[in-house]
Image (tube, rainbow, N blue to C red):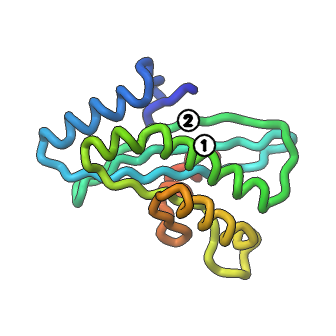
Amino acid sequence: MTWKKFSGEVISSPILEEIEQAIIRETEKGYKLKVCIGTDSQVKGALTDFATVIVLLRAHHGGFMYIHQDKTPQKMSIKERMLVEVQKSIETAYSICDLLDLYDVDLEVHADINTNPMFKSNKALNEAMGYILSMGFIFKAKPEAFASSTCADKMVH
């Protein structure tokens, strides 16, 4: 899986190593960190573009993120696409959660799903929330889900 920085620079080391180095570097500078993971997607013609982000927040001092993007020609309903987004976020969270536990860094999984029933994405809210919570992660939906609805969204638009 290829990860890159917001600048576009490709991460050459495994993402786990990159995140561990970032945690060490940032905590040595005195920052309290939190990690938020989210995925967004955009249908572009025959392809669906997915972007998953790992956002490292420094309490009261901004943050930075790592991005993974992939495309699929698979046709999906809105509900299926929302749940694929959640699955990608959970897979990423699961791959780094032991490292975050080791360094006592909090983790949230953000879903780009609206809590307002007037929006189409709301159809997947209960399943997404259940999936994320059942995996033991903290769940955030719109409007609190900035990792997916702002950071990942920026990468697919």
Q: What element carries label 2?
A: strand
Amino acid on which disc 1 is placed: Ala
Circles 2 and 1, Cβ within 8 Å, touching? The answer is yes
Label 2 or label 1, whichever comes before in sequence order: 1
Identify the residue under disc 1: 51
Horizontal placement of 116 versus 143: left or right? right
Horizontal placement of 89 versus 32: left or right? right
Residue 6 percent across, percent down from the top left: 45, 37
Q: Is mark 1 on a helix, strand or loop?
A: strand
Q: Which of 112 and 9 is in front in this view?
A: 112
Q: Which of 38 and 132 is in front in this view?
A: 132
Residue 59 percent across, percent down from the top left: 24, 58
Residue 152 percent across, percent down from the top left: 55, 49
Q: Which of 127 and 59 is in front in this view?
A: 127
Query: Residue 68: which numbered mark, if any?
Result: 2
- Choose top left, top right, bottom left or bottom right for residue 98: top left
- Choose top left, top right, bottom left or bottom right for residue 81: bottom right
Horizontal placement of 66 versus 34: left or right? right
